[in-house]
Amino acid sequence: MTALPANFNPANLKVVTAAQMTALEQESERQGTSTDTLMEKAGLAVAEYARQRLGSVAGLRAVILVGPGNNGADGLVVARHLQRWGAEVTACLLTSRPDVDAKLEMAREYGVSILKLSESPDLDSLNQLLGRSQLVIDAILGTGRSRPLQGVVREALLRTAAVRVQGQAPLLLALDLPTGLDADKGSVDDATPIMDATLALGFPKAGLLAFPGAERVGELVTLDIGMPDGMGQDGVSLELLTPDWVGSKLPPRSLDSHKGTYGHLLVVAGSRNYVGAACLVARAAHRSGVGLVTLATPESVYPIVASQLTETVHLPLPEDGEGRVHPDAAQVIGEVLTRYDAVAVGSGLGQSENVSNFVESLLLAGHSPGLPVLVDADGLNSLSQLREWWRRQSGPMVLTPHPGEMATLTGLSTAEVQRDRVAVAREWAARWQTVTVLKGAFTAVAEPVSAPADGDERDGMVRLSPFANPGLASGGTGDVLTGVIGSLMAQGMDPFDAASCGVYLHGRAAEMITKRQGPTGLLASEVAEALPLAFKELRAA
């Protein structure tokens, strides 16, 4: 085992709004790091990324699309460094620049060609430049500009996109965020091209992790621009999960351990029509390191799952005439609950009055006092039918709805849920006092924060997954996530951390597979089988 430095304190990456970024820059100035210093470091960092990505820039032709404000000034710094390193750089000014423009004059002094399209919009010359260039950098509009796009800016972006469609493929980078993408909400202009990469300066902006704009971002890379240490750690309540942070939170695996060391998870899942869901939850829990898994399923399902899961302990439950769990099963489980460290309920239970009565009795009538409980799938559908169910929960709870289930739980439409996923997850986590995992691309994990006694309210923290993988849009992948989070809770992790780490591990395991075989045809069982490799990678991070 490698010893970590005494001061090793990994953190997730803060994600900011435009207003928060402006406040951070102002605070940086107060602490002695000027905006000009940040601009110089940002431009150098972007230029270095481009040089590293391309291998060399000597002799390379590059176009920098320059706008009116600081984003354009950053682009002019990039142009200067690329020219200094031997590139042939043209800065295309698509709008007017300040009368006194030190960054423009410095770029000109270093030999950067300046094309003022704002004064003489000769877009045929831009076409020629784009067609013969190996690198194009969008440094037009930053976080402070309103949309929609128009005029020369819009036409320049349309022509940039057209060059790429025609088969000529210069590397296209966005400086801080693609022009036309709203920094806060992720709405995007139809003229905005799809980037190869977006280089977020200091912190990623919230809109880069929201759809539809996220489709245009390409690879999201965050660059250090020299802001003072600790900047942004207070007052920013949105984070992007990082491998270092997740790896630091995982339960240790001691040489002097046994199965009891790593907890016992009870999985309540499955019905006659949904046998596979129960198997996937249990298998994923095993693959996530829990010491023991007991799978409680209806009596007729038990022999099927027992033949598939040789490592699992089984608890047959009373069932109704449709092969779903009977309400009396809550009493059966309640008599043995002291054996377990966490419970995962809901996958594949089916929907009926009996199932709803069972869920109410198990979760809200004191049968699971104090145990951390994860509720998914049909467990969520049952909760949605119970008036003010959250006032009767008896212990910490994690909910893992997909957008449709979140809509059912909240009374919102699915479109309303998706319109501002972070705000919805945060609001309802606080209202329900449950950790809420809103699944989907960039899954949002919201902590349950209640108002403190002094009335000084704060927003609950929301942690975002960095993964948006269409391979996960297949049946059973949510059951695998249930198994991962349940396993981590049974191993003693705090529910919010367990949900956050589980979401990252699940996404990383899926990414490992899709990088090898593509996003089509990914099976949930493959994600479960890849989990040990994801754990191994993160423990080594």
Image (cartoon, grey):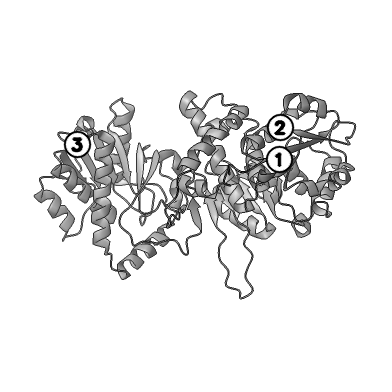
Looking at the figure, which quarter contains the C terminus? top left
Q: Earlier in the sequence, mark 2 or mark 3?
A: 3
Left-right relation of 522 to 277: left
Q: Nearer the viewer, residue 270 or 119?
A: 270
Q: Is residue 152 visible?
A: no
The kind of secondary structure element at disc 1 is loop
Q: Quadrant of residue 476?
A: top right
Name the amino acid, label 3.
Val
Left-right relation of 537 to 364: left
In x, y percent, where is residue 312? 74, 33
Name the amino acid, label 1.
Ala
Q: Nearer the viewer, residue 169 or 295?
A: 295
Gap between marks 1 and 2 measured at Cα: 10 Å
At x 67%, y 32%, the residue is 283
Gap between marks 1 and 3 measured at Cα: 52 Å
In x, y percent, where is residue 290? 66, 40
In x, y percent, where is residue 448? 63, 58
Query: Residue 377 got which mark?
Result: 1
Query: Residue 57 got which mark?
Result: 3
- The residue tagged 2 is 277
User: How many residues crowd around disc 3 within 10 Å: few (fewer than 14), some, or many (20 or more)?
Assistant: many
Proximity of marks 1 and 2: CB atoms separated by less than 8 Å: yes
Q: Nearer the viewer, residue 497 or 223?
A: 497
At x 38%, y 54%, the residue is 146
